[in-house]
Amino acid sequence: MEYEEYRSPEQTPAAQSPIEPAPPVEVSAQAPPPPAPPPPPRKVSGWRIFWGVVVALSVLANVVLFFMIVMMVSFFMSGPAELFDSRDGFGEDTLVKGPASRKIAVIRVEGIIDGAQSEKFKKHLKAAGDDANVKAVIVRTITPGGTVSASDQMHNAIMRFRRESGKPVVAFMQTVAASGGYYTSVACDKIIAEPTVITGSIGVILNNIVIKELLEEKLGVQPVVIKSGLKKDWPSMFSETTEEQKQYLFDKLIGPAYERFVNLVDQGREGLSEADVRRLADGSIYGAEEAKDNKLIDQVGYFEDAVELTENLAGIRGARVVEYTRLFTISSLLGAEAKTRPWEIDRNTLHELTAPQLMYLWDGCW
């Protein structure tokens, strides 16, 4: 028996009808959206700039302070810098190691000899005299000379030191040790010079600038000088130096200073007679070997030879060699000790630049 399967209307398949394809969708080409406009520039206020500069300067100041502290710490911790009197602003720098009970003090004379150098030299020499451990002194001379007064003060200080302390003093010449540099050296017990040194120039010089023609003819300035006597302003920058004035200056200044130079060389150099000194004292310069041949110096050598010679005079061996040096200070680093700014000229500076100066100076290298 055949049965017909019953299906519910939901189960009855729908009539199959052909599926028509969907109509194509037309896509219209559209331009991309325009880019967003840039944000408006931010306005920088004056206060922002001000505080930025303040912060930058603060950072820079802290960096400088840091390096200054590092320099100070390294100065006091690197090596044996023995401070014997910090109030005088100088200490000891060890050049050759040795026992502290046997020391040779090196005092440097460098540059033009003037009043400031003379005062510093005398302080160093006093320190060497007060230190019982210092057995001798080496005067390290690198100078073409300087003023008559300062050179004579240093010569006198060396002679007094030798007389009062009984400690030997050796002059060690380097590079140039002429005129006032030689003047101070003859006060020492012995003189030793490097082979390439220039020394001698025994004599006196007086320079004077005359600006009369410049003022009157170029600038139209007529200088007026009112004086109590004819010779009051000899020599003057406002008038020509006559032969009478030159002779007057020679008799009053050049001659006496020259005679003193000759006499001190004669006293300081035992192997030379006064006639020998006058023969050599015509202003000539001498090399080391020529100076030794003429008995102006005792020996040609280097610093080590100067130390050995000094030890022999002091009767010691293996000495510690120290040099007196200026201590590091914040004020010296920042230049606080300068009296005037480079572009400022006060009355004293102007006078020093224009006034005639009597010099024990070899003028050929300046």
Image (cartoon, grey):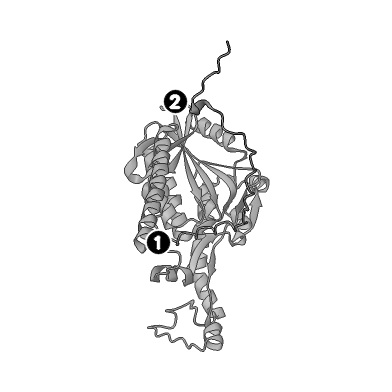
Instruction: Tell which circle, 1 or 2, labels the residue nearer the N-terminal end.
Output: 1
Toward the front, the furthest residue is 1
Q: Residue 43 location, x and y as percent?
A: 40, 62
Q: Nearer the viewer, residue 261 or 228?
A: 228
Name which residue lies at 40% across and 44% down. Answer: 68
Q: Which residue is identified by label 2?
A: 99
Q: Nearer the viewer, residue 208 or 347?
A: 347
Going by the numbered disc 2, the residue's amino acid type is Pro
For residue 112, above or below residue 187: below
For residue 57, above or below residue 93: below
Q: Quadrant of the C terminus?
A: bottom right
Q: Residue 82 location, x and y as percent?
A: 39, 34
- Neighbor class of circle 2 (other Cα within 10 Å; few <14, some 14-19, many 20+) is few
* Circle 2: element type: loop
Name which residue lies at 52% across and 73% down. Answer: 208
Q: Which residue is identified by label 1?
A: 44
* Circle 1: element type: loop
Label for residue 312? none
Q: Residue 225 location, x and y as percent?
A: 42, 85
Quadrant position of residue 352: bottom left
For residue 111, above or below residue 354: above
User: Does residue 337 appear in the picture of this structure?
Assistant: no
Going by the numbered disc 1, the residue's amino acid type is Val
- From mark 1 to mark 2, how far is it between C-alphas? 68 Å
